Image (tube, rainbow, N blue to C red):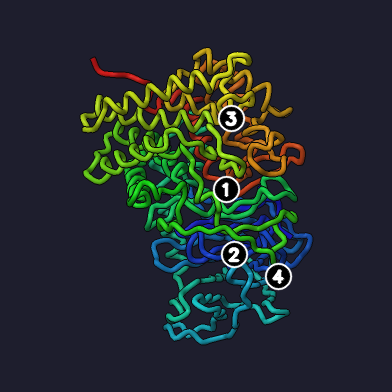
Amino acid sequence: MAALIEDYALLSDLQTGPLISREGSVDWLCFPRFDSPSVFSRLVGSDEHGHWLLAPSDPGAAVVDRHYVESTFVLQTVWEASGGRILVTDFMPLGDSSSSLVRRVTGLAGSMEMRQELRIRPGYSTVLPWMSRVIDSGPTASLVLLAMAGPDAFALRGPHLPQAHAHGHEGTFLVSEGETVDFELAWFPSHRPVPAATDVDAALEVATEYWSRWGSHCRQDGAYGGAVKRSLLVLRALTHMETGGIVAAPTTSLPEDFGGPRNWDYRYCWLRDAALTLESMLTHGYETEALQWRNWLLRALAGDPEQMQIMYGVGGERELPERELTHLPGYADSKPVRIGNAAVSQFQADVVGEVMVALERLRMAGGKEDHFSWALQQALLGFVEKHIDDRDFGLWEMRGEAQYFTHSRVMMWAAFNSAVRAVRLHGLTGDVEKWEHLRDRLREEIMRQGFNRSIGSFTQTYGGTQTDAALLVMPQVGFLPYNDEHMLGTVARLEQELLTGDGLLLRYRTESGVDGLEPGEHPFLACSFWLVEQYARTGRHGEAKTLMDKLVGLANELGLLSEEYASDEGRMAGNFPQAFSHLTLVRAADAMHGVDRLSLAVEEPE
């Protein structure tokens, strides 16, 4: 059985992101990329669906400390038992085309027997690999436990390799004070030779130095500076080193409602998330990374704008068909377990706006357009113009009927507003008169059809009465000031309709059936962070601090946040760690710290 979501730690080699439980079990790992088939699937299954446990044999042993080495993803866990004390250091080496996971056990006091269980189950646990022991041909001539499964191969190295037992491998070994025992599990293409053993000391030094150096560049101050730095590190950890694509989360099918069907695959790159990541990186001093994300965006979008998707594979792949893995019981019996994502084919009218806003912020920070990037943006504006009268499925990827979502219409306005400013303020060329006309037409329409005067609030859809937390984005993109009376009325309505008893904000009311799914969902953390920003920007500092402290306090001891929080059960829900939660944490902290994120309010030169 999988652990509580908040009991997991993330590792990263900027290619993939395994999850390790507090109990020392690697329950989720996709080799070699974030969106590759998993080799350990216990997170959404059982022991037999793949895991790698390394923990004391003594059932009385307890974890007394677990932390990342400062500003890194080098995880250290200290165990204590009556006979001794040990340290387990888990990390992924960086800078190699191969991918591996290293687990180091160090005796701190006395002695302790360690237990190891290994169940390698490639292909989302559909393949039982051929296991064998081979002698490494390298200079050490060491014994390697080898697993072969079609195109994939896995090699476990270490001085105490587990023995075959019940379609897996198990074993024990003793660690005494001052002794160090290293294990490495490496993935490699099965047609290639077994990769050479990693120099663990050197690899640990490189990984620690890389993450520490990256974190040291973070511009952050104030009471929430530590949470901002860890959030930016998470965003970096979820980024593929070579392509620059950022995944929404490293997991699939962690439920938004335990036991329900709201289980989605988030191991892909949403244009929206990539654009918002670019903004956060710019604000906190990572201009090089922002340009890398811009280049990923441009490559992914290249081609006929009519073929634009809302998400892509890590390398820009377009084919992400959704299917159900019926052989996996799901996390907390939440079915189905899904891979792929059917939302890839949806029309979401807000996406181009997010991209245009992010690229404008890059211009404002000094980023230069080239012939490719501005031409592509103009083509995207043509796509928005062509579909300006089309209904869409909205930010939340509704699986019901297409609607005129107010947030989507605002983001279409933002796309044209950014284009107008590109010409008027930044000297680029384009049909600015047409873009101004379309921008102004959308503004008039939104104020007329998206604002319900009888309730004094913007609504989720045109002509509706229900609100939506996505409406909090309106002042963020400059559509209205934060303290505009229309926004203040909307915030009051959101507080009345979507605020839960413990002060967290729902996305929308699922009972309405607008999303085409059974009702039931927990508060979406990003929405509550948006509310913090709104409070902070309108002088409600006490309420902003109370809510921000609560939200930051929901992170686990490693600073990681999931998608949602189940307040009634006091536990995290949804995919983990979630990029969107960490992105909005950064925004909220910036608002609390008084950081100027480059104004996008409508302005024209004289």
Q: CA distance from mark 2 to mark 1?
A: 28 Å
Q: CA distance from mark 1 to mark 3?
A: 21 Å
Q: CA distance from mark 2 to mark 4?
A: 28 Å
Q: Which residue is mark 3?
A: 469
Instruction: Give the mark, 2 or 1, whose residue is nearer the N terminus.
Output: 2
Instruction: Give the mark, 1 or 3, whose residue is nearer the N terminus.
Output: 3
Residue positioned 51% across, 60% down in the render: 35
Residue positioned 46% across, 65% down in the render: 201
Asked if one can make out residue 314 in the rendered structure from this viewpoint, the answer is yes
Callout 3: helix, strand or loop?
Answer: helix
In this rendering, is residue 4 above or below 54? above
Q: Amino acid at mark 2?
A: Thr
Snapshot quadrant of residue 468: top right
Q: Which residue is mark 4?
A: 48
Callout 1: helix, strand or loop?
Answer: loop
Q: Residue 441 in the image: x percent, y percent?
A: 39, 23
Q: Amino acid at mark 4?
A: Glu
Callout 2: helix, strand or loop?
Answer: strand
Pick the quarter of the image with the N terminus: bottom right
Q: Which residue is mark 1?
A: 577
Q: Which residue is mark 2?
A: 106
The 10 Å Cα crowd at callout 4, few under 14, some 14 to 19, many 20 or more, is some
Q: Residue 115 in the image: x percent, y percent?
A: 69, 70
Q: Amino acid at mark 1?
A: Pro
Instruction: Give the mark, 4 or 3, whose residue is nearer the N terminus.
Output: 4
The 10 Å Cα crowd at callout 3, few under 14, some 14 to 19, many 20 or more, is many
